[in-house]
Amino acid sequence: MSEDSPIIASITGVLYPFIIMFGIYIIVNGHNTPGGGFQGGAILATVFIGRYIVTPVDDMNLHAMHSLEKLLLAVLILVPVVFLFAELNRAHAWLNEPYLIFMNLLIGVKVSLGLTIVVFRFAFSKDR
Amino acid sequence: MFELILFGIMIVLAFLAIETNILRKAVVFLGIFSLVTSFVYLYNNAPDVAIAEAVIGSALVTLLYLTALRRYKVYNICFTNEEFGTVVDRNIIEGTRRGQLLRDIENICLNRELEPQIVYTPDPLESVKARGIYDLIIRQEKDSITVYGHRDNYFVDELEMFLILRYKDLECSFVRFGDDGDDDEEQIA
Amino acid sequence: MKKLVLGLFVAALLGFVLFVHDTHTEALENDLLVYYRENFYADTGAENAVAAIYLNYRMYDTIFEALILLVSIIGMIHFFRAGGQNE
């Protein structure tokens, strides 16, 4: 792993859109095909972490990401409480599929934010 | 049969990851190990687990280990001088401060993103070597110094080149040792 | 010597695990398995049974998993408090 290899940088630049597309595909189709929020979120997180390996710059707003993650957790608890535990899914069966896609999206974004925060916190902290 | 072949590859990779001396190689072996594990999951009809294992094991954890290796590498250097206080070479010890040579070694360590930790001791070489925690042992005898480095440590080669070029008039020899304790003397500059 | 002892220990452990695996005969009742396999699409509208389980039948599990991720990140941030951006 040399510090600034142009080969790795350009190849990773070409690969980014495909990795992002694959992650979003895994998340959105999680209710029909293998995969789901966690797996897709981890794939999305590799994009950010691979970017750190290529160009180690500390320009992410980790604080905002952390706040967003807390907000997503609140939504993640609220949606099943309103929809699932109130047994709305039996009354309105057509809402099931949008519910699954939405929950997978929430979990995917939350997991990708969380893993990115973990790695960037670890990489850019001075003390130990 | 296919599964048995995968299990065999997994055992070989795990053994290699433990036995190799270079950490970066061990990380790569662990990444391949996770990939083979995900094939085993796929073979047993668990595509969900296979995706998670492939992404976490071979991508995320590998990158995390590489980040950790880049960030934190301690390089233990032991400086031993059995006649401490009787002979003073200004290249090595200036009064109580470390001399020019040790400062240079420290600087090239920092350039390679290694964290140098230097220990001074008047103990004899055998007892220092028996502790087995030092990556590099520098021994001073009167005016000459001897550098002991592990055979698998690629940084010792760089250090050797640097010392030969920088200190032409210093009597300096290099010894490589392996795990079993046998030495091979290399050259005298 | 130490390596030999460790190797023997690992080999003995492997033998023990394989022995237990070979002689183990207990099997769980699979009522729940049959129920999930027959009814998951009608209950949840998901074609992937795994998604049906972790987003509907076992929702508490998912919620607390997400909570664990958040808690571990909070711990991480406090552990590395003095680093990077705050300086």
Image: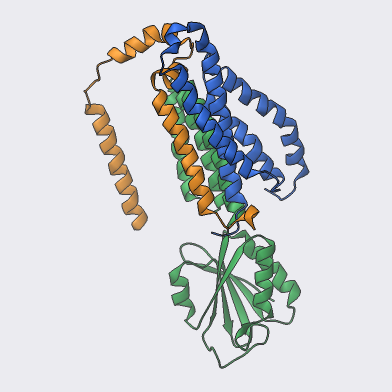
- Residue A88 image offset from top left, x and y in percent: 44, 12
Q: Quadrant of the C terminus of chain B?
A: bottom right
B52, B11: nearer the viewer: B52
- Does the rendering let one see residue B149? yes
Q: Quadrant of the N terminus of chain B?
A: top left
Whether C64 is drawn above or below A80: the answer is below
Examine the image and state in which quarter residue A65 appears. top right
- Residue B136 image offset from top left, x and y in percent: 56, 69
Examine the image and state in which quarter residue B98 appears. bottom right
**Which chain has been coloured green in this picture?**
B
Left or right position of A81 against C5: right
- x 71%, y 28%: residue: A17
A41, B37: nearer the viewer: A41
Examine the image and state in which quarter residue A15 appears. top right
- x 75%, y 31%: residue: A14
Whether B64 is drawn above or below A79: the answer is below
Whether C10 is drawn above or below B143: the answer is above
- Residue B135 image offset from top left, x and y in percent: 54, 66
The type of colouring in the image is by chain
- Residue B121 image offset from top left, x and y in percent: 50, 80
Left or right position of C25 against B74: left
- Does the rendering let one see residue A33? no
**Which chain has been coloured orange in this picture?**
C
- x 66%, y 28%: residue: A19
B170, B81: nearer the viewer: B81
**Which chain has been coloured blue in this picture?**
A
Looking at the image, how many numbered discs can be counted on the residues? 0
